[in-house]
Image (cartoon, helix red, strand yellow):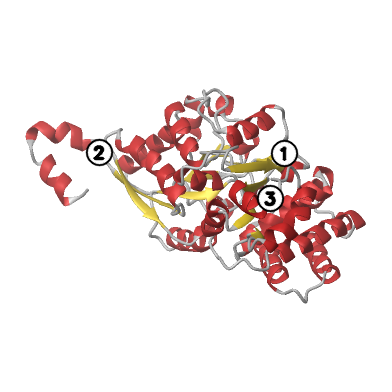
Amino acid sequence: MTVMKSLLCAGALLTATCASATELEVTHWWTSGGEAAAVAEFAKAFDATGNTWVDGAIAGGGTTARPVIVSRIIGGDPMHATQFNHGRQAEELVEAGLMLDLTDIATAEGWADIIHPKGLLDSCTVDGKIYCVPVNIHSWQWIWLSHKAYKDAGAKVPTNWNEFVASAPALEAAGKVPLVVGQQGWQTSGAFGVINVAVGGVDLWKKINVDKSAEAAASPEMTKVFEAADAARKMSKNSKVGDWNLATAMVIKGEAGGQIMGDWAQGEFSVANQVAGKDYSCLPGLGVNEVISTGGDAFYFPKNKDPEITKAQKQLASVMLSKATQVAFNLKKGSLPVRGDIDISAANDCMKKGLKILADGGILPSGDQLLSADTTGQIEDLFVEFWNDPSMDIKTAQARYVKLIKLAD
């Protein structure tokens, strides 16, 4: 409790109110403009319960933040709530008994009936118990296109990947970067995954990521994916940024033609007052295979011995999944809500595309839900090298990828 709150609680008239007020430190890696606006909706909703959100933002994205978060939890200095992506990132912490069991509140509030798709809650479930609350659906399966860049280049805005590749020379002649890619492992491996689905198809992607088929990874169809990835790295050779949001800013300013990035990029367009369909276009599945991958974010709550903190943790979990908070947060974040029973009519054109694909059943599991953190890290390392080393040919990259899939867990 803060000093100010302690002084206020000294007053007899405020004792009842302050007795139930609890501060929770919440760690996350949402630090860009759009992300900060979104997370503020969570903080506002939680503070409205009489408790206090103590923001523990960690700059640098999930790759930087997760080791810090894990170290604190296993080191005996846990925060009260923390972000992870859907899937297996917190698996070992749950198995070690370090995370709060939320099954009672999930059952009482009927999470199984309202969370869609069901796989999101399954990712929070270990041995039949629920340990996290999914808060959004983020899909990697998008490319974002700058109308200004194409206007400056005198070229038509593409409607699919092949048209995008064909437009690259015109963009380069106009001094634009055709495809901007931030030079971080998760960005380059993420872009490769999107190209995999678009060029290779959903079935090939599932054989590799779900079935862990090294044979599929070595197939001629997969060679075509690597050829497309090679074209992508050539189009992005003049990218000079690291963080994803700086790459998005280049699209917003018309300095780059496009960016393969998840739908969290919409938050940056929103903060910049850009209008979908007017200032920028979005192509799900690169305009080829229109699917939504059900990645996203979930919050876990490390165990503690204070019953008041435990009570507040469950209050926060409930608030994050409430109808009003789901709408407010996801409109700012650019993600899709995890509740299938809310009105999201205020969504922009790109969000509506995603909602329709979701409703039509075009759902693809996220790689985070299928591959261990160790395997994911090795794949990221490979594509950092591939994207930044033009001397690594397609044959070499694919052979290394096959080995990683063969050993994947």
Compared with 273, 3 (above or below) is below
Q: Which mark is residue 291?
A: 1
Callout 1, which amino acid? Val
Q: Which residue is depicted at the point 49% across and 37% down?
A: 330
Q: CA distance from mark 3 to mark 1?
A: 14 Å
Coordinates of residue 81 in the picture (x, y in percent): 42, 47
Note whether residue 297 is visible: yes
Coordinates of residue 322 in the picture (x, y in percent): 44, 29
Q: Which residue is depicted at the point 44% across and 58% down?
A: 73
Compared with 210, 400 (above or below) is below
Callout 3, which amino acid? Gly
Q: Which residue is depicted at the point 52% across and 55% down?
A: 249
Q: CA distance from mark 2 to mark 1?
A: 43 Å
Q: Say which label, 3 or 1, has the lower sequence index.
A: 1
Q: How many marks?
A: 3
Along the viewing direction, whichever of 294 and 244 lies nearer the viewer: 244
